[in-house]
Amino acid sequence: MTSSHPAHERVVIIGSGPAGYTAAIYAARAMLKPLLLSGFEPGGQLMITTDVENYPGFAEPIQGPWLMEQMRAQAEHVGARVEGEYVVALELKQRPFVIRCDSGRTIAADAIILATGAKAKWLALPSEDKFKGFGVSACATCDGFFFRGKSVVVVGGGNSAVEEALYLSNIASEVTVVHRRGSFRAEKILRERLAARHNVKIRWDATVEEILGKDAPLGVTGVRLRNVLTGAFEDLAVDGVFVAIGHAPATELVRGQVALKANGYVQTTPGSTETSVEGVFAAGDVADDVYRQAVTAAGLGCMAALEAERWLAAREPAREAAE
Ligand code: NAP
């Protein structure tokens, strides 16, 4: 729907991970009638997670997609509107702000809560691009099934890499974790679980230099590793490669409009979700380069809604006078 008079909202939340849904719950309960634009893949990173054991309130492990369904249902139950629009542009120099969606719809907003999260990082190898979807993946829970009884490599040394390796070790015949250093940054509990798996090997101090494969049909046959200490190369025969080297904040919409930190995350005032643009608040992985947990994202979403509410209330008299 294209309109020359866009719908005018008090607060629009962009993103549908724990930060976005929690902001929606708090904003709805503050009677702000928030609109949440959920994007193409609603639910964020937890949609591609299986067991969640560290989100408080659940004695037994819960499933990531289930948790996100619950958050969405709760947000809608208290009055938030959740719509599957994908935002393609923000205009933050004018008031109200303008939000453009790929459907052609334009929305005017007094306040925006940016909760666009983070996206998986890739190794940036031409061979990785070539075999993406044909043996190269960044999501074991999405694609692991295709490697039943086969051998795979997982690249990375953080929680994501170790969780991917644990998940894949139940499906694949052999999992080799390739990490560029000599120790994991993943939590101890995960490291211990990995060490107990009989079909998991670890290549320390190694990087993937190239993904090897064949053209007809397109598919992975191996990886070329380089030992970073000796410089020696080694080819390892595998059927799949899972890249789990962390995430980069999804800031495309605000780049050049809102101050970013040197590492690319949205800059917020310490102890707050305020950005460099008054009325724009940022919550969750798009602004958090330290904790990056579902529960901290939810906490930041709560803060963003409370701060947006206070900010809107403070300028209410001026708005009423202008009308
Ligand atoms: P991360 O903690 O940033 O770890 C990324 C890993 O990839 C690091 O080991 C890093 O190596 C390696 N790496 C980065 N760039 C690389 C490159 N170009 N080539 C080779 N290796 C590279 O990312 P994450 O594991 O996705 O976790 C992100 C956040 O989510 C963390 O805060 C984590 O605790 C959280 N998380 C939590 C859970 C959980 O609680 N169950 C699960 C998943 C994620 P170096 O170690 O050498 O830097």
Image (spheres, rainbow, N blue to C red):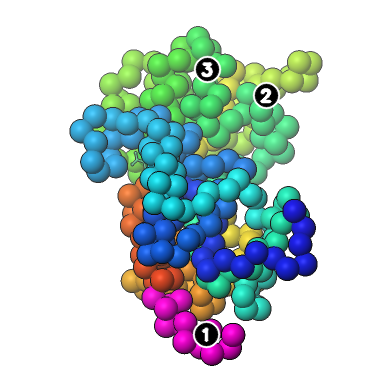
**Mark number, residue 311:** none
In terms of depth relative to the viewer, which is nearer, 256 or 202? 256
Q: In this view, does 136 lie above or below 313?
A: above
**In magenta stretch: residue 315:** yes
Q: Distance between the residues labelled 1 and 3?
A: 58 Å
* Farthest-out residue, top: 149
Ligand 1 quadrant in view: top left
Side of 258 relative to 20 (left or right): right
Question: Which quadrant of the structure image shows residue 211?
Answer: top right
Question: Which quadrant of the structure image shows residue 159?
Answer: top left
The amino acid at mark 3 is: Phe
In terms of depth relative to the viewer, which is nearer, 103 or 224? 103
- Residue at which label 1 appears: 320
Give x and y (percent) for residue 248: 53, 52
Instruction: Mark yes or no: residue 293 visible.
Output: no
The amino acid at mark 1 is: Glu
What residue is shown at x 42% (from left), y 27% (from top)? 165
Q: In this view, does 146 lie above or below 316?
A: above
